Image (cartoon, rainbow, N blue to C red):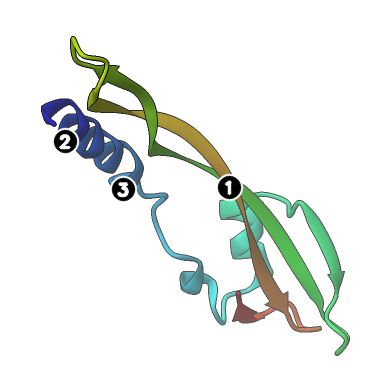
Amino acid sequence: MKIALTALLLSWLVSGCASSGGGSQDYFSQHKSVLLEKQGPPDSTRPDGSGGEVWLYQKQNKFLRLEKSQTMADEYGQPNAEFMMPKEHTTTVTQSFYISSKGYIYKVR
């Protein structure tokens, strides 16, 4: 039980305490040059349908999840302990910045 609680605490600390700084909403109503300066060029772009464009940024997030690793048995062969071990997983998050034809960010998703 102590091992499982320790692993759970460790996974929470590693995955939950990191922050990338300012939020994407900080760019709302800013000129696209501010976004370009702070985030670099977008991973891809597409038209927004109103004469502007959408800049897409992709970011991979890594996190730990506890998963059943092994079951221990007592001297009679009965299971008496399960060990949970952290396993790394990755998700990809896409942020979309909608930019008007005049170059100002009007929506962030």
* Disc 1 to disc 3: CB gap under 8 Å: no
Q: Which residue lies under the disc numbered 2?
A: 5
Residues at marks 1 and 3, CA–CA distance in whole angstroms: 14 Å
Ranked by sequence position, the earlier of labels 2 and 3 is 2
Q: Nearer the viewer, mark 2 or mark 1?
A: 2
Observer-nearest residue: 13 or 72? Answer: 72
Label drawn at residue 16: 3
Residue ID at (27%, 28%): 82
Ranked by sequence position, the earlier of labels 2 and 1 is 2
Residue occupying the far front of the picture = 76
Vertical arrangement, residue 53 with respect to residue 95, above or below: below
Observer-nearest residue: 18 or 45? Answer: 18
Residue 97 in picture, x, y percent from top left: 67, 71
Residue neighbourhood size for the residue with mark 3, other residues' Cα within 10 Å, grouped as few (<14), some (14–19), many (≥20):
few
Ranked by sequence position, the earlier of labels 1 and 3 is 3
Observer-nearest residue: 17 or 33? Answer: 17
Residues at marks 2 and 3, CA–CA distance in whole angstroms: 16 Å
Residue 40 in picture, x, y percent from top left: 66, 49
Q: Is residue 27 left or right of residue 12?
A: right
Q: Quadrant of residue 50?
A: bottom right
Q: Which residue lies under the disc numbered 1?
A: 91
Element at label 2: helix
Vertical arrangement, residue 86 with respect to residue 95, above or below: above
Element at label 3: helix
Amino acid type assigned to the residue bearing label 3 in the image? Gly
Element at label 1: strand
Residues at marks 2 and 1, CA–CA distance in whole angstroms: 24 Å
Q: Is residue 17 left or right of residue 59?
A: left
Observer-nearest residue: 86 or 62? Answer: 86
